Amino acid sequence: MPYIVFDADSEYGNALVDGIRRIHRAKFGCSTCNEHPALSGPVSSEFVSSEPVDMLYRKLWSDSESLTVLSCFYAMIRALTAFAEEREGDGSRVGGVDEAKIAALRSMIDYVQQHYHQRVTLAQIAAAGCVGRTQCAVLFHDMVGQSPIEFVNDVRVRAGAELLATTQLPVAEIAVRVGFSRSSFFARVFQRYMHVTPSAYRRSMRR
């Protein structure tokens, strides 16, 4: 069967449920949480409708939603990978996906997370997962929904968005810090992913 049942009270089941709840909180908010959803601690099981309690929280949830969902995705992949590694050698499959493919994707995602601020090529990403470039592209397409290079740019843009919101660094310097060779290219890619220019994003975060 293309699924596996986890006990919500087990280590891995708890991690997966926590990821799902955090994604829900990022989208809809939580009736018992008084903090920004990306910074809060234990997850409450009580949720409200899609209307946040006030305009301030509405803005915070909107601004942090993509970063929170991406972070939760990584955490859930790690939990599935760790579970797969524990079952390694018995010929089992997790969620209909070969353990080796999950492990390869995890290694490639980790490589991108660690090196996105440097020059990153398809060959380097594939080598991190011990797969060929074609298999690398297939894994990202099937399991992430992006090409490897699109994923790299996505990670760079999210890192750039955080710097825009939390520092006074010039846009040109932020572009270099997150791996773009030119600020103009950073601006184009940022607008493609975030649907707003870097400067406009920074202004919106200061209101």
Image: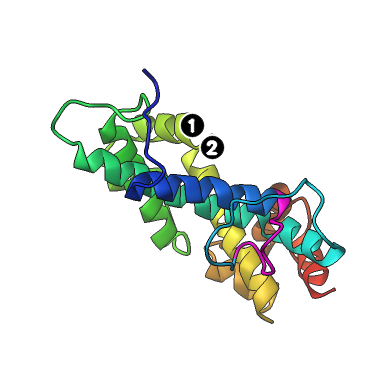
Residue 120 in the image, given as x and y percentages of width and height:
43, 54
Mark 1 belongs to which amino acid? His
- Residue 88: x percent and y percent? 18, 36
Q: Is residue 59 or residue 109 the one in the foreground?
A: 59
- For residue 146, the mark is 2
- Residue type, label 2: Gln
Q: Is residue 180 left or right of residue 114?
A: right
Q: Quadrant of the N terminus?
A: top left
Nearer-N-terminus badge (2/1): 1
Q: Secondary structure at mark 1?
A: helix
Question: Where, by quadrant of the figure, is residue 32 drawn?
Answer: bottom right
Residue nearest the viewer, comparing 137 with 78: 78
- Magenta includes 166? no
Residue 180 vs 106, above or below: the answer is below
CB under 8 Å between discs 2 and 1: yes
Residue pushed farthest bottom? Answer: 168
Image side of residue 33 versus residue 205, left or right: left
Give the alpha-carbon distance from disc 2 to disc 1, as whole Å: 5 Å
Residue at the location (71% across, 55% down)? Answer: 29
**Residue 121 visible to an observer of this rendering:** no
The number of callouts visible is 2
Magenta segment, prevailing SS (helix, strand or loop): loop
Residue that mark 1 sits on: 141
Q: Position of residue 5 (x, y in %)?
A: 38, 31
Q: List x then y, in percent, for residue 39.
A: 59, 68
Q: Which mark is residue 11?
A: none
- The reply to whether residue 36 is visible in this rendering is yes
As drawn, 22 above or below 143:
below
User: What range of the chain is rendered magenta?
Assistant: 28-38
Q: Residue at x 36, y 24 (%)?
A: 96
